[in-house]
Amino acid sequence: MSETIELSVVMPCLNEADTVATCVQKAVRAMQEKGVVGEVVVADNGSTDGSQELAAEHGARVVPVTERGYGAALMNGIEASRGRFVLMGDADDSYDFLEIPKFVDALRQGSDLVQGCRLPRGGGHVMPGAMPFLHRWFGNPVLSWLVRLMFRIPINDVYCGMRGFTRKHYDRLDLRSPGMEFATEMIIKSGLYGASMSQVPITLHPDGRKEHGPHLRTFRDGWRTLRLFLVFSPKWTFFRPGLLLMAIGLLGYALAMPQTAVFGAKLDVHTLLVASLLILMGWQCVLLAVLARIFTGREGMMPPHEKLERVTVERGLVLGILEGAIGALLILVIVWRWWRQDFGPLVYPQTMRWVVPGVTLVAIGFQTAMASLMAGVLQMQRHRRAPVAVERESATGAA
C-alpha cells in the first residue's frame, strides 16, 4: 500500500470540530482533481469535541497522539504517513487545501521542501482579519528576515504552516521540537543540510473556528522561535559577539598602554582592566561557539564541522599552556623587580601594565585548556559492539 501512495496530507488537530471536516474534504477533493493517489492523516492531540469522528467520516485516517504540542502532533502524524511526499497544514480552515496541486507540482520537479508563502513579498495574500496586526507587520517579517540573514535561506514566510516535503528529506532532518517552533526547525535544518527549497504563493483565510481561538501564543512562541535561531547558530550567538568584544578590548589595550588621551581623557590602567574583562568575555564566547558547534554536529542537530572535528585535545592544551606561560612570565617580571627592591612599594601605573596583561593571559590559558578537555568529552562517540556469535555445543558433540 505504501508504494502506491504519492502524497500524505497531515493535519494536527486539537478540538477542531468546526473546521476539520471541511479541511479533510478539500484535501481529498484536491488530490482527486489532480489525479494524486494520496491519503489524509489527522494527528489528533487529545480532542474532546468529536473532531476524530468527523475527520474519519470524511475520509481521513486518525492517528492519536498523547504527547501535547503542535510539533509532537505533526511528528507522530508524519511518522504514521505512507506517502512519498508529505504536505502539512493546520485544520482550522485558514489554509485552503485546494491549493495542494501547487505543492505537488514543485515536489515532482525535484524540490526537497516547498514552502507556502502568505506574505505579499513572496506573492501571497492575507485576507482581511486572517492574521493579527503584530504577526503580519512585525513578527513574521522580522523572523523571516532573521532566517535569511543568519542562515542564508531564501524563505519569505518562515512561519507558514502549509508546506510540502519529501519523506526522504524529512527522515534525515531528525526534528525534535514538540511545540510551535517545529516548523521553524524544519526550515533551518533544511538550509543547514543544503536541501533544495522553493516556495509557492498561497492565500491565508480567517480562522474558521468558533468555539475557541488560535493555539498560537504571540510572545511565548515568538521567543521560542528566536531561541531556536540562537541554538542553531553558534556563529551569531557566540562567535561573532565574542570577536566583537575581543576587538573592543584590544582597542582599549592599544589606547591605554601608551596612555593615549581620548577627547581629553587620559586612558590608564583602569581602562586596561575593563579591556581585559572584555577580552576574557569575548574569548569565553569564542570557546563556547566551538564547543556548541562540536556538540550540535555530533548530535545530528547540524552537519558536522570538518575543521573542528580535526581539532585535538592535545593542540588545545598546548595552546592553553603557552598562553598561561606567557602570562605567568609577565607577572614574574614584576615579582623579580619587586624582589630587587626588597619588596618595597611599587609604582602601580607602571607595574600594572605588566600584571594586568599577565593575569589576563593566565586566565585565557586556563579557559583554553579546560575548553579543550571539554571538547574531548564532546568528541567521544559510543561505539556499538558487534553481536558476538556464541557457538553452543550440540548434545552429540559434547564430551
Image (spheres, rainbow, N blue to C red):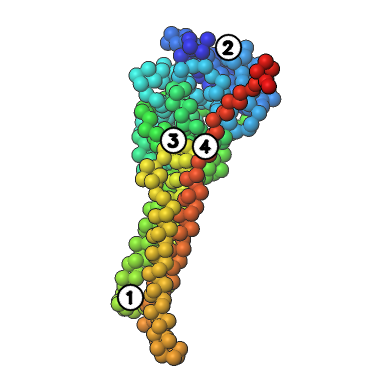
Q: Secondary structure at mark 4?
A: loop
Of residues 13 and 110, the one drawn nearer to the viewer in this rendering: 110
- Decide: is 246 above or below 33: below
Q: Position of residue 180 (x, y in %)?
A: 54, 35
First-in-chain label (3 vs 4): 3
Query: Image quarter for residue 325?
Result: bottom left
Give the number of the mark in front: 3 or 4.
Answer: 4
- Decide: is 273 above or below 148: below
**Residue pointed to by mark 2:** 59
- Three-letter code for the amino acid on which mark 3 is drawn: Lys
Q: Position of residue 76 (x, y in %)?
A: 58, 26
In the displayed structure image, the side of residue 370 where residue 46 appears, left or right: right
**Cα distance in 3D space between marks 1 and 4:** 52 Å
First-in-chain label (2 vs 1): 2
- Three-letter code for the amino acid on which mark 1 is drawn: Met
**Cα distance in 3D space between marks 3 and 1:** 46 Å
Tell me whether the residue at label 2 lies in contact with that at label 1, contact meaning CB atoms closer than 8 angstroms.
no
Of residues 350 and 270, the one drawn nearer to the viewer in this rendering: 350
First-in-chain label (1 vs 4): 1
Tell me whether the residue at label 3 lies in contact with that at label 4, contact meaning CB atoms closer than 8 angstroms.
no
Query: Which disc number belongs to residue 189?
Result: 3
